[in-house]
Amino acid sequence: MSIQPGGALTNTEVAKADLSTVLHTWSAQGTLDPLALADGNGSTLWDFDGREYLDFSSQLVNANLGYRHPKVVAAIQTQAARLAMVAPSHANEVRAEAARLIRERAPEGFEKVFFTNGGADANENAIRMARLFTGRDKIISHYRSYHGNTGAAIAATGDWRRIKNEYSHGHVHVFGPYLYRSPFWATTPEEESQRALEHIERVIEMEEPSTIAAVIIETVPGSAGVLTPPPGYLSGLRELLDRHGILLILDEVMAGFGRTGQWFALDAFDVRPDLITFAKGVNSGYVPLGGIIIPSAIAHHFDDRVFPGGLTYSGHPLAAASAVAAITAMTEERVVENAASVGDRTIGPGLRELASSTDIVGEVRGSGVMWAIELVCDQQTRVPLPAAQIGRIKAQLLAEGLLPLIIENRIHVTPPAVITHAEAQRGIAIIGDVLAEASR
Ligand code: PLP
């Protein structure tokens, strides 16, 4: 069947054409029934049958500016009409400006940006950089994490997606803090923090510190459940790694660019990373883009040594132009401040109210526009709500006009950072009604 993009189509026609030609990510193809999306504006999306959805997903947590942002769209159009493509070896003014704006939002001392196509290759190259800079090989990361789908990034990942992809060598995993399901029998955030630090310290000792290049963690583990680190964990980790000359790579691919209510999630903690990786929110995903923010010492290490890594589309001008426009718009329109305010004043209180009134809500946690609702069979045992029930909840949310992001037994509340208080309130009310019905 041949379809005309943009023509008058139905959801069924688009889904059928898609499934007969596209092999989808991370799935058994026969189980799929994709929602066909036709259009969007701000935090609203429409399917091909004309149904409207309030977006509580930001797709894969990347549409921080929502849809159809006029300044980002115009910047891509203008750049496409001038120089749509240029090799990374050439100098390009839009790429330099994107790097400057990104660097400006990082902590002091960060000097250069290495551009990639997305988050996985940002982490891949950060790991490569750490290995070359230290002359060491091993990489430590958390079990509850996702770092992307390339050789070392997927091996650093902790979740199920790693298991069939472990071809990169030298990876070691540890348990990070997760008080609600504490791997350390902790009962307070302070205990969880201290015991997680003791655990990673023992692992570092047993692995021989002088063989370890870096620890890579998400500042706020996202797909794993929005696991904001407890007080003292990141600063304690920094201190531990400094003692052994081990680098700290903070993966800000999901948490960065306004998601947590700060430009970078790390801004809320007393921690200084050695490398920062980003993607998603840097340009709200309008054109694929990611990268590494590099401090002077590591950047200049490669002044007289070759950095053995590159990509045809590194610093692609359409991606760079969209990043310049997106960062400028986020600044002028105070989008990061909006994310913080919606999180503090509407989403946080709304979800906490839900937790106190609904049996199947075990815990809510997060900040800004990055939250998770953990659904359980009962609040005492904390047994995760079974997949079949989660599936029914998802279908009901969609039927009520809310596009959710569901991962395992959790509803992730990750709307665009431009969402209004009223929209956030409306979405939480829908979730409240659906969960109340589900717990009856
Ligand atoms: N790191 C984190 C924290 C992520 O959430 C993701 C994607 O979800 C990635 C890395 C991989 O990014 P990409 O899919 O752009 O390669």
Image (cartoon, rainbow, N blue to C red):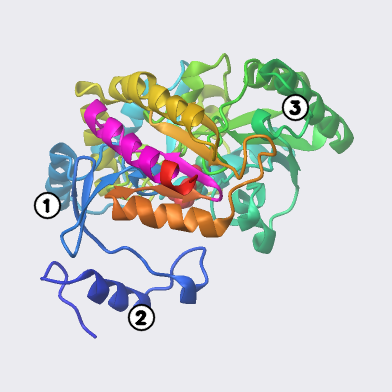
For the N terminus, which image quadrant?
A: bottom left
- What amino acid is at disc 1? Ala
Looking at the image, is mark 2 or mark 1 earlier in the sequence? 2
To which quarter of the image does residue 363 belong? Answer: top right
Please say if the residues under marks 2 and 3 sit with CB atoms less than 8 Å apart.
Answer: no
Q: Is residue 226 above or below residue 148?
A: above
Disc 1 versus disc 3: distance between alpha carbons? 52 Å
Q: Is residue 320 above or below residue 192?
A: below
Q: Nearer the viewer, residue 399 or 270?
A: 399
**For numbered disc 1, what is the local secondary structure?**
helix
Asked whether 429 falls inside the magenta stretch, the response is: yes
Q: Which residue is mark 1?
A: 81
Q: Give the class, few, some or many, for how many residues have Cα within 10 Å of label 3's Cα (few <14, many ≥20).
A: many
Q: Position of residue 356 (x, y in %)?
A: 50, 27
Question: Which residue lies at the image location 75% right of the left edge and 27% below the top edge?
Answer: 196
Q: Nearer the viewer, residue 83 or 48?
A: 48
Label 1 CB, ligand 1: below 8 Å?
no
Q: Is residue 47 above or below residue 41?
A: below
**For numbered disc 3, what is the local secondary structure?**
helix
To which quarter of the image does residue 228 belong? Answer: top right
Q: Position of residue 336 (x, y in %)?
A: 32, 24
Q: Residue furthest front?
A: 440
Q: Nearer the viewer, mark 2 or mark 1?
A: 2
Q: Give the class, few, some or many, for how many residues have Cα within 10 Å of label 1's Cα (few <14, many ≥20).
A: few
Q: Which residue is mark 2?
A: 20
Asked whether 159 falls inside the magenta stretch, the response is: no
Residues in magenta?
A: 408-435
- What amino acid is at disc 2? Ser
Disc 2 versus disc 1: distance between alpha carbons? 34 Å
Q: Which residue is mark 3?
A: 196
